[in-house]
Image (cartoon, helix red, strand yellow):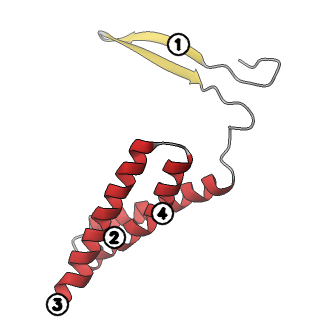
Amino acid sequence: MTTRDGKTKALITARYVGNTFVAQYAAMAFNRENFGMKGKNLICQIWIMFFGCIAIWLIGRPEAWGRWGYVFGIIAQPAWIYTSVKNRQWGIAVLSFWYTYSWGQGIWFHFIANRW
């Protein structure tokens, strides 16, 4: 449903599934300006998706080259940190720093420490 000013209102339908009440959102409350991602936000989302997916896939591999997942994981972290701080998502920002530390540990143990 669209109002005169071009904003879409959220339509909520409800139904029972078993004994559980489930609310379904038929449309989200997007206005024209917020519908698509633009600029740095779009770049960060693509960056996170690309490097994050490669990192997780590589980490799950049993071959020796799977250790490169730690490198791809740490490459994704600046985008995570920037996006979470810019959007004031402080819990995700703290978690991003924890992930950065964890990816760094993987780099340390799989690339640096085993050479000494």
Please tell me which residue lies in front, 50 or 97.
97
Tell which of 25 and 17 is nearer to you.
25
Amino acid type of the residue tagged 2 in the rendering = Gly
Residue named by callout 1: 13
Frontmost of labels 2 and 3 is 3
Q: Is mark 3 on a helix, strand or loop?
A: loop
Q: Which of marks 4 and 2 is nearer the N terminus?
A: 2
User: Residue at left 66%, top 30%?
Assistant: 30
**Mark 4 vs 1, N-terminal side:** 1
* Marks 3,4: beta carbons within 8 A: no
| Mark 4–mark 2 distance (CA, rounded to whole Å) | 16 Å
> How far is disc 2 from disc 1 in space, using C-alphas?
43 Å
The residue tagged 3 is 116
Q: In which quarter of the image is the C terminus?
A: bottom left
Q: In 3D space, how far apart are the residues under numbered discs 1 and 3 (Cα atoms)?
A: 62 Å
Q: Give the residue drawn at x 33%, y 75%.
A: 68
